Image: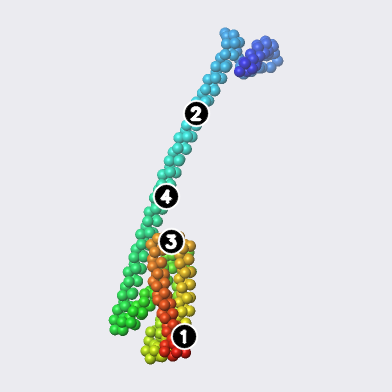
Amino acid sequence: MKKIIGILIFVICLSACVLPVMAEKEDVGIHATLTIVPDSSRTPSDNVKKIVDDTRANISATRETIKGEAEDIKSGIRENITEVRISIRENISEIKSSVDDKRNELARNISDLRDSKRQQLEELNRSLQNVTPDRRGWVKNQNEVRIAVHTLLSMENRTGGIGQNVSAIAREFNNSVSISEKLEQKIQERSGIMRVFLGGDRDAAGQLANITSQNQDRIQMIQQLINTETLDPEVRVFLEEQLQTMQREENRLEQLATREQQDRGLFGSLLGN
């Protein structure tokens, strides 16, 4: 500040010295314009003080202006942040509403599938009223597993990225069901005389055991696909219910095949085969 005051005093003094010279040269066309003209009624120190005061006033006014502009900017930022927050809340609310709608729709679809499955099973079981109790039991099991497989196929578009893979495996399973049914029928209807003397149908039992082993692998593959996919809880539970039905049937068939292979009959026991 002292340095600035010294410069200002120097400029004022220099101007006072140059004025007379410039006045003499007016007739030659030389004119001078001074940026700072000291007040003749004041001393140089008064003029310097006035300049300093004016400078301080300008600085203070500039600070106030900047401060006001900064407050306006802050206020604008606050308003923008508030608008963004409101927009985010609205978007989140819309997303949650959309998710809830999809879940409700999915729940209705699962409920419809359960009803359809139950109706199909009841319809199939009504056709077994005139068959023997033994046959009714194992045919009923076959009906349950067949409907479970068809249910998996019907859910292809509801199981995300695994839908096509699950359906492909379920089709392979479904193709084996008819063969398993024929083999079981052959075992179940084996005549009592042949069973007494020759034992079980080991050829049919071996084929059935082989198919059962393949189906066990298919069930595990579907379960692995379900475990790797992020599914709606209701969809996951419904899928696993079908797998449990299929697993129970394969366990039953596996036990049937084992018993049939172990049934040696009278001749088999005597010959030690």
- Disc 3 marks which residue? 231
Q: Amino acid at mark 3?
A: Leu
Few, some or many C-alpha atoms within 10 Å of disc 4 (few <14, some 14-19, many ≥20)?
A: few
Residue at coordinates 39% horizontally, 89% vertically from top-left? 196
Give x and y (percent) for residue 18.
68, 12
Mark 2–mark 1 distance (CA, rounded to whole Å): 97 Å
Q: Amino acid at mark 1?
A: Asp
Quarter of the image that includes the N terminus? top right
- Disc 4 marks which residue? 91
Q: Which mark is residue 67?
A: 2
Do tag 4 and tag 2 residues touch (Cβ < 8 Å)? no
Secondary element type, mark 2? helix
User: Closer to the camera: disc 1 or disc 3?
Assistant: 1
User: Closer to the camera: disc 4 or disc 1?
Assistant: 1
Q: Earlier in the sequence, mark 4 or mark 2?
A: 2
- Disc 1 marks which residue? 203
**Image height check: is 2 above or below 248?**
above
Few, some or many C-alpha atoms within 10 Å of disc 1 (few <14, some 14-19, many ≥20)?
A: some
Give x and y (percent) for residue 35.
62, 18
Give x and y (percent) for residue 16.
65, 11
Q: Which mark is residue 236?
A: none
| 167 vs 50, nearest the viewer | 167
Taking 14 as reference, is 80 left or right? left
